[in-house]
Image (cartoon, grey):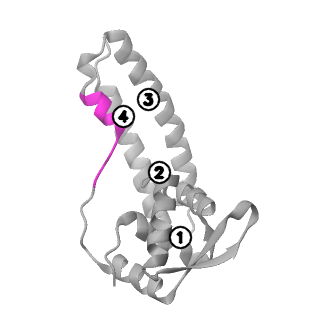
Amino acid sequence: MPDLNATSAALLGLLQTGPMTGGQLVAAAGQRFGSFFSITRSQVYRELPALAEAGLLRLGKRGARASQQYVLTAAGKRAFTSWLSSTSGSEHLRSPLILRLVHAGQLTPKQRANLVSSARARYRGRLDEARAAAKAATTPYLKAAADFTVAHRRAVLTLLDAIPTD
């Protein structure tokens, strides 16, 4: 069984609910776990052929504008279950905002204030969205992930409050 990277595993997980096109997978990924795990369109379209070649997916129906559905195979289900139960893989936080804040001392006070205020406004809105998602979660697993997202967004707001802007 091939080793799966997190992006491949995310796609196999989304396909557990049924066949989807690449575009549907991009949208579903953003909706389901975009707050804590981002997947780009280019990543999806790079991974799908590799997963099909490995026998973890098969081609499904052709749709409008030459869209192609992908269907999870039995081998794909086994590979996903194996990935789920494994403990390997390191955790990575990749935040362009935090990277900017690390270097914020190189900005003028006005630039720093603009960076912090615009980020604060975005994260306040994202916090409201995360709270709504936590309230709407239908399983304890989705609720736990949604609660994490709320805590993460609060932590970013706390970080922003700690950045001197003068």
Q: Main secondary structure of the magenta part?
A: helix
Look at the numbered disc 1 and give the secondary structure of its residue.
Answer: helix
Q: Mark 2 points at which residue?
A: 35
Q: What element carries label 4?
A: helix
Quadrant of res 113: top left
Q: Which of 75 and 34 is in front in this view?
A: 75
Secondary structure beneath dot 2 equals loop
Instruction: Decide if residue 15 is on the left or right side of residue 110.
Output: right
Q: Nearer the viewer, mark 3 or mark 4?
A: 4
According to the picture, the residue beneath numbered tag 1 turns out to be 14
Residue 24 against residue 98 in the figure, above or below: below
Of the two numbered discs 2 and 1 in the rendering, the one whose residue sits closer to the viewer: 1
In the rendered structure, which amino acid carries the disc numbered 2?
A: Ser
Residue at which label 4 appears: 97
Task: Kindly identify the residue that appears in the image at 58 percent across and 50 percent down.
Answer: 132
User: For the residue marked with disc 1, what is the amino acid?
Assistant: Leu
Q: Mark 3 points at which residue?
A: 119
Q: Which residue: 64% across, 69% down?
A: 68
